[in-house]
Amino acid sequence: MHTKMPKLAVIGAGMAGLNLANALSDFAEVTVFEKSDKLGGRIATHMVDGFAFDHGAQFFTAKTPVFQRFVESLHEAGVIARWDAAFAEIEGVKITAQRRWDAAYPHYVGSPNMNAIGQYMAKNLEVRFNQHVESVQRDHGLWLIKSTTAEVLGEFDWVVFAMPAQQAYALLPDNCQFRADLLDVVMQPCFALMLGYASPKPHAWDAAIVSESILSWVSINSSKPNRAPAFSVVTMSKNEWAAAHFNQDDSFVINAMLHELTQVMGQPMADSSYLKLKRWKYANAARRPQQMTLLDNALQLACCGDWCKIGRIESAYMSSVDLATKIKAMLTA
């Protein structure tokens, strides 16, 4: 006798949401809802006027065997490449260390851009774009999901929230057993400044971690493998500085970051032919003492994401692996 598969909604099409959806697609009828028109969440590339900017995640590494196997599959599929960057550590304006990234500890980026990763992961999934979920309410034993326009998006047995903790908290019902735990999660903001130039700038490194500055990171994005050759730079602010100035207007933030970038690069950097500021309200998760497992068996609600662990791309993947294992056990019991 054929048993009808349970219906499972995943809200959020970043790394965690897409991997969870794939892991459970043989055990449930899975639908992914994404509020934007793109896949991958913060694993993203902004492309314009011949420039390509990774304005979210800059690269990723693989430490755990499970994630390493996944990364190998991405590499074999041609959707990632190793970035052997000339890397520097900078204090203020002084280079304190330099080394070349290599195969001994690989650093990966999407190929030909970060968007390729989400597109590859979603190729066998039902993803509904531009669906901003407003509410998740219980109705006759099922979860009724509604959009901001009051449209009913569907009825589901399970709902998994693959989104920042603050956004999940707003959607979860009061009686969810782990809802209060989300109040302990600290998500920090970040500014990403994208700069495109008509001609290359001299540079002694491709990527740098910066201290004693309002900046935390600078990279020559056009140095990444298989990228558009037009000279592009991405610089990220420190989380603390972004938190203190998040309500300032764009011009204040841009001018401050450009001033610091000019100091770090040792040359004028305000002559870009393209400039754009991206505000990430929920960019990074503060380190947690241990992994969080956010699953309410009775209500059939759960959360996953990088913030459930340490806050890297690998964390998002492993969070979804852990949760998928638990939900799969319940679906097959």
Image (tube, rainbow, N blue to C red):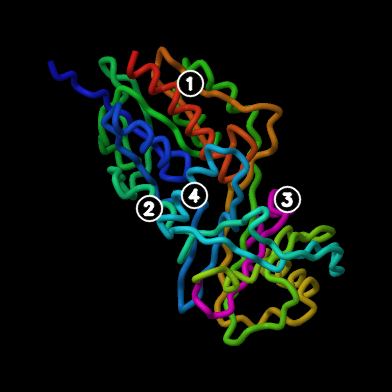
User: Residue drawn 77% across and 81% down?
Assistant: 267
Classify mark 4: residues with Cα within 10 Å, few (<14), some (14-19) or many (20+): few
Mark 1 or 2 closer to N-term?
2
Distance from Cα at disc 1 to Cα at disc 2: 27 Å
Is 84 magenta? The answer is no
Q: Mark 3 points at which residue?
A: 244
- Residue 72, label in figure: 4
Residue type pointed to by label 3: Ala
- In this rendering, is residue 26 above or below 84? above
> Dot 3, how many residues are within 10 Å of its Cα: few (below 14), some (14-19), or many (20+)?
few
Q: Tags 1 and 3 in contact by the CB under 8 Å rule? A: no
State the separation of the CA atoms marked 4 and 2: 14 Å
Please report whichever mark, 4 or 1, sits nearer to the chain's N-terminal start.
Answer: 4
Res 295 label: 1
Residue 279 horizontal/vertical position (percent): 58, 56
Q: Do the residues labelled 1 and 2 touch (CB within 8 Å)?
A: no
Q: Residue furthest left?
A: 1
295 relative to 281 in the view: left or right: left
Q: What range is drawn magenta here? A: 227-251
Q: Helix or strand or loop: what does disc 4 sit on?
A: helix
